[in-house]
């Protein structure tokens, strides 16, 4: 179990994102953070002491998998949403937090109703940051990060400061985990 409890956000000192905050990059460039953690892991020997950077990055990426959701299911208005629907077709993916659902099969069927399945595929995507890297294009990755903000009640009109982002990632994990 991870017992690391940071008291402040992490600011990169070097690398191509010098001066930027790791917490902000979770939303803006998640794929870089995943790549960087991999890089750190493959370039350190198993018995070496982990740097604070690596410890913080591992913690942050783990937190991205369980952020508490506040948005209610648009169909039943009772349960919190657990998944976004991603519609994939010839011209790429389309997605919107409005097309999300709780775990109930009826609610999911309401979202998928009317979709032309001869030309489009609907994918249910859990509300986790790790889903971001499943998208090929930066624009789609940004859209997914924006949907996480909406699902978790982050005001997208307000500027995302490193302090606000840090507070978001230090909130307790959600209690129900998506499948
Ligand atoms: Zn529902």
Image (tube, rainbow, N blue to C red):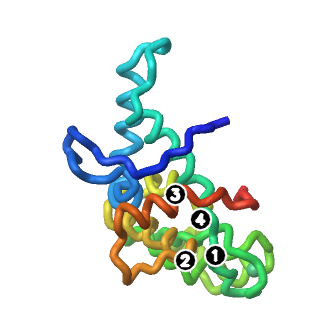
Quadrant location, the C terminus: bottom right
Is residue 16 shown left or right of residue 165? left
Residue on which the image places disc 2? 153
Mark closest to the chain's N terminus, 1 or 3: 1
**First in residue order: circle 1 vs circle 4:** 1
Q: Is residue 4 left or right of residue 40?
A: right
Near-viewer residue (124 or 43): 43
Does the rendering let one see residue 112? yes
At label 4, counting other C-alpha atoms closer than 10 Å, the crowd grade (few under 14, some 14-19, many 20 or more) is some
Q: Which residue is mark 3?
A: 169
Q: CA distance from mark 1 to mark 3?
A: 14 Å
Residue beneath label 1, please?
70
Marks 1/2: CA distance?
A: 6 Å
Q: Which residue is mark 4?
A: 123
Q: CA distance from mark 1 to mark 4?
A: 22 Å
Any atom of ligand 1 within 8 Å of the CB at mark 4? Answer: no
Callout 3: SS: helix
> Which numbered circle lies on residue 51?
none
Q: Is residue 137 visible?
A: no
Image quarter where ligand 1 lies = bottom right
């Amino acid at each position: 179990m991870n017992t690391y409890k940071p008291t402040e956000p992490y600011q990169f000192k070097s690398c191509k994102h010098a001066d930027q905050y790791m917490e902000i990059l979770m939303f803006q460039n998640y794929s870089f953070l995943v790549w960087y953690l991999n890089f750190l892991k493959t370039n350190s020997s198993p018995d070496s002491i982990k740097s604070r950077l690596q410890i913080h990055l591992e913690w942050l990426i783990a937190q991205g998998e369980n952020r508490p959701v506040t948005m209610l299911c648009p169909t039943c208005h009772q349960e919190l949403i657990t998944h976004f629907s991603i519609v994939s077709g010839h011209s790429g993916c389309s997605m919107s937090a409005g097309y999300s659902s709780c775990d109930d099969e009826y609610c999911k069927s309401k979202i998928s109703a009317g979709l032309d399945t001869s030309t489009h595929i609907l994918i249910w995507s859990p509300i986790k940051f790790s889903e971001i890297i499943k998208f090929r294009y930066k624009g789609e990755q940004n859209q997914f990060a924006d949907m996480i903000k909406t699902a978790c009640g982050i005001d997208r009109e307000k500027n995302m400061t490193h302090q606000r982002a840090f507070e978001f990632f230090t909130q307790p994990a959600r209690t129900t985990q998506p499948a």
